[in-house]
Amino acid sequence: MIEELNSEVPNVLAFKLSGKLHDEDYKTFVPKVDEAISEQGKLKMLVWFHDFHGWDMHALWDDTKFATTHCSKIEKIAMVGESKWEEWMAKVCKPFTMAKIEYFDVSQVEDAWKSLEDTES
């Protein structure tokens, strides 16, 4: 499931990803991102993995398409996770986007939010 989280900063979108992601998740997630890009221009994102179990095959393809079509429209991503493989995933994502990616442990979620509020990043 992809759940949108409240953000006080207009050009920051935040989402919590949990369970296993499916095509239906991307059918609601991608339009929200596209709408925000059309209103705000480049975005910053917080992506919080909570009890995350990955993607089914269709959702993995959706995620790949999203990364390639949005790679220049997102300037910074703060990834928040609970496990080593999620930290590793943040490193693997870097070649697929022009965004600056930072990984934060779940205990550092407030730092992740603050990193996105920084106007110079």
Image: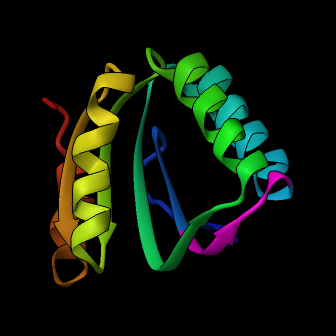
| Above or below 119: residue 113 | below
| Above or below 99: residue 104 | below
Going 70% across and 29% down the picture, which residue do you hit?
A: 34
- The color scheme shown is rainbow
Residue 75 percent across, percent down from the top left? 33, 26
Residue 94 percent across, percent down from the top left? 27, 32
Going 22% across and 44% down the picture, which residue do you hit?
A: 91
Residue 4 percent across, percent down from the top left? 63, 64
Residue 96, quarter of the rendered image:
top left
Residue 73 percent across, percent down from the top left? 48, 19
- The secondary structure that most of the magenta stretch takes on is strand
Residue 79, quarter of the rendered image:
bottom left
Return the residue nearer the eye: 71 or 4.
Answer: 71
Return the residue nearer the eye: 25 or 38.
Answer: 25
Is 109 situated left or right of 53 in this image?
left
Return the residue nearer the eye: 92 or 119.
Answer: 92
Is 76 situated left or right of 42 in this image?
left
Going 16% across and 32% down the picture, which residue do you hit?
A: 121
Q: Is residue 20 magenta?
A: yes
Residue 62, quarter of the rendered image:
top right
Is 48 situated left or right of 94 in this image?
right
Q: Is residue 99 magenta?
A: no
Residue range in magenta is 17-23
Question: Where the N terminus falls, by quadrant?
Answer: bottom right
| Above or below 11: residue 40 | above
Going 32% across and 19% down the picture, which residue do you hit?
A: 98
Number of numbered discs on residues: 0
Is 75 situated left or right of 110 in this image?
right
